Amino acid sequence: MRKMLAAVSRVLSGAAQKPASRVLVAARNFANDATFEIKKCDLHRLEEGPPVTAVLTREDGLKYYRMMQTVRRMELKADQLYKQKIIRGFCHLYDGQEACCVGLEAGINPTDHLITAYRAHGFTFTRGLSVREILTELTGRRGGCAKGKGGSMHMYARNFYGGNGIVGAQGQIFEAYNMAALWKLPCIFICENNRYGMGTSVERAAASTDYYKRGDFIPGLRVDGMDILCVREATKFAAAYCRSGKGPILMELQTYRYHGHSMSDPGVSYRTREEIQEVRSKSDPIMLLKDRMVNSNLASVEELKEIDVEVRKEIEDAAQFATADPEPPLEELGYHIYSSNPPFEVRGANQWIKFKSVS
C-alpha cells in the first residue's frame, strides 16, 4: 500500500511540475468538427445564396484563431511603434476586421489574385508574408517586404497586388463593374463596410447604404463580416459563381474598425467610446470564434491561451528585429523601379542629383 501511495505521489508531483494547461489539454478528447448556424446573407439578383450552416473542423478553427490573433496583435504592436515614432508616415490599422481577411483567404485559392486598398496589413499576412516582413516594412528597414521603401500602404506578395495610397484609387468602380459584366470576368468585388468613410458614418454619406446592390446589374451579397464562418462560406459561394462562367459578383462585408481611420485619427470625435466598446463586447470576431470552439469542445480555454502566448512572442520577436534592422542606404533610393531592366539613372530632387536604378 505504501509503495502504491509513493508511486501515485510521484506521478502527481511529476504532473504538477508541468504547466497545468498542457496537462488539461492532453487529458481531453476534442471533437473533430462541429456544425454552426450562421447568419443568412441578404441577396441581390440571386435566387439562392450561401448556406446558413457551416462546418468547422478543429484543425481549421485553431488555424483561423491563430491567424486572427496574429493580425490583431501585429496591429496593436504597430500602434505602439507608431506612438514611439519608430513607424512614421501614414498607418491604417486593421484590428476589428480580422474575420474579413482570414475568412476571404479561407474561401479562395492561393493562386487566386487579390488587390486591396490602403488598410492592407491583414491581407498582406494572410497572403503569406511573415509578421517580421510586415513590421520591418512599417519601420522602413531593409528586411521589409518592399525593402523598406513601401511602408504601410505599399506591400506586395505573390498574387497580391498590395495596398494603394490613394483613397478610392483601387478602381473607377462603376466603370469597372460595367466592363466586368460586359466581359463576364471572374471577379469578386468586395466592399469592407466598416461603417465609416474616414470620419463620416455611412448614414451621413450615402442616401442608400445597401452597398451590395451598387453593382446594379451585378448580383450581390451582404455578409456578416464579423463572423469568419459567414465570410468563408460567402466567399466560397462567390468564387464558385465566378468560376462557373456567370461573371462578376459583389460582396459587402459588414464589419467594424476599432482604431480610427489612420493613426492620426483618434477615432472618437465622430463616434462614442461606448459604441466601440459595445462592438468589442458583443461582436468581436476573435471572441465569437473562441466561444464557438470552446462551447463545442473543439478546443479548450487553456489551449487557446497557449496560442495567445505563442503569438505574443512571435510579435515581440518580429518587433525587435524590425527596430534593429538597418535602414536601406540612400544609394538604393532608385532601385526596383522595373523588374527586369538594364541599370539607368534617375534624377533626384534637383537635376544635379542622380541615383542609379537597378532591377
Image: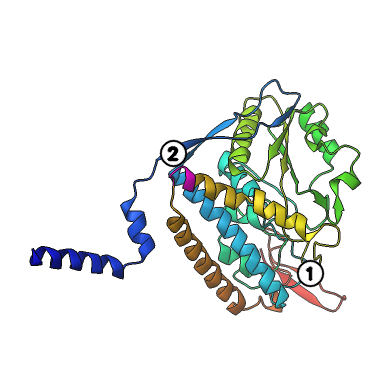
Q: Main secondary structure of the magenta part?
A: loop
Residue 295 on the magenta segment: yes
Residue 72 place in picture, x, y as percent: 61, 59
The residue pinned by badge 1 equals 346
Seen in the picture, residue 98 relative to 309 is either above or below; the reply is above
Is residue 44 or residue 298 the one in the foreground? 298
The residue sitting at 49% across, 50% down in the picture is 63
Residue ID for mark 2: 33
Q: Residue furthest front?
A: 1
Crowdedness of circle 1 by 10 Å Cα count: few (<14), some, many (20+)? some
> What is the distance, in whole Å, between disc 1 and disc 2 at their CAs?
57 Å
Badge 1 or badge 2: first in the primary sequence: 2
Can residue 17 be seen from the camera position used here? yes
Please indicate whether residue 304 sits to the left or right of residue 273 in the image: left
Whether 145 is drawn above or below 202: the answer is below
Q: Amino acid at mark 2?
A: Asp
Residue extent of the magenta highlight: 294-298
Q: Which quadrant is home to the N terminus? A: bottom left
* Magenta region includes residue 45: no
